[in-house]
Amino acid sequence: MKKLFSVIFMNFFGFDMIIFLVAVATAIVFYFTKKSADVLYNKLHLNIFVPDSGASRRQADSDISGIRETDIVSMRNRTGSLYSLFVNLTGIFPLLGILGTVISLLGMVGDMTNVQDNFYGALTSTFWGLVFAIIFKFLDGIISAKIEDNEKNVQLYLERNNAEHSQSGEQP
């Protein structure tokens, strides 16, 4: 078991460090993407508790009328940009793993004394690339549903807003 861990972490300060740094950057992008998607979702899904008083109705009307179309579109665009960056970063992990393996194998050509250990070390890049690809693909599945829901709700909001403004003769 100890040998397994030593092999897995053998290349850590080599090419595997690049994979870990990209994983940290991807995690940060995921955090901001999720945060942006949650803010947009909460903006589009106001929680209004309407007891029997007229004050609550006025508060609800105030909250709904306070939403500006440009803010919603800007939030949707920001979330879309962050999500696109997240998806692209997630997609490069298997490629980084394979690249690390190839680089390690090329470095092994000159030293054939300990081929088996060097070969195991070369495969660690593929291992880490696949591990992070699986983790971030799972996180992508979690966030993509909310982003799709937000996209549909923004579209519905824009259509309703345009219909209301065209009936009243105003510009949105």
Image: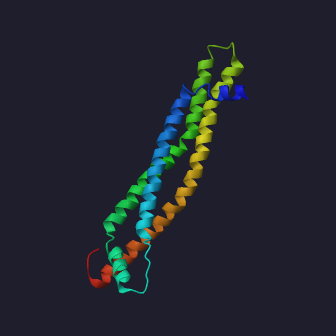
Relative to 108, residue 67 above or below: below
| Position in image of residue 71 (x %, y %) | 33, 64
| Position in image of residue 19 (x %, y %) | 53, 35
- What residue appears at the point 36 percent right and 75 percent down from the top-left corner? 64
The quarter of the picture where the N terminus appears is top right
- Please give the count of numbered marks on the rendered protein: 0
Relative to 91, residue 46 above or below: below
Q: Residue furthest left?
A: 170
The answer to whether residue 171 is left or right of residue 103 is left
The quarter of the picture where the C terminus appears is bottom left
Relative to 165, residue 82 above or below: above
- Residue 76's quadrant in the figure? bottom left
- What residue appears at the point 40 percent right and 67 percent down from the top-left corner? 43
Name the residue nearer the viewer: 37 or 125. Answer: 37
| Position in image of residue 104 (x %, y %) | 60, 24
| Position in image of residue 164 (x %, y %) | 34, 81
In this picture the colour scheme is rainbow
- What residue appears at the point 56 percent right and 37 percent down from the top-left corner? 95
Name the residue nearer the viewer: 78 or 46. Answer: 46
Name the residue nearer the viewer: 162 or 125. Answer: 125
- What residue appears at the point 60 percent right and 51 percent down from the top-left corner? 138
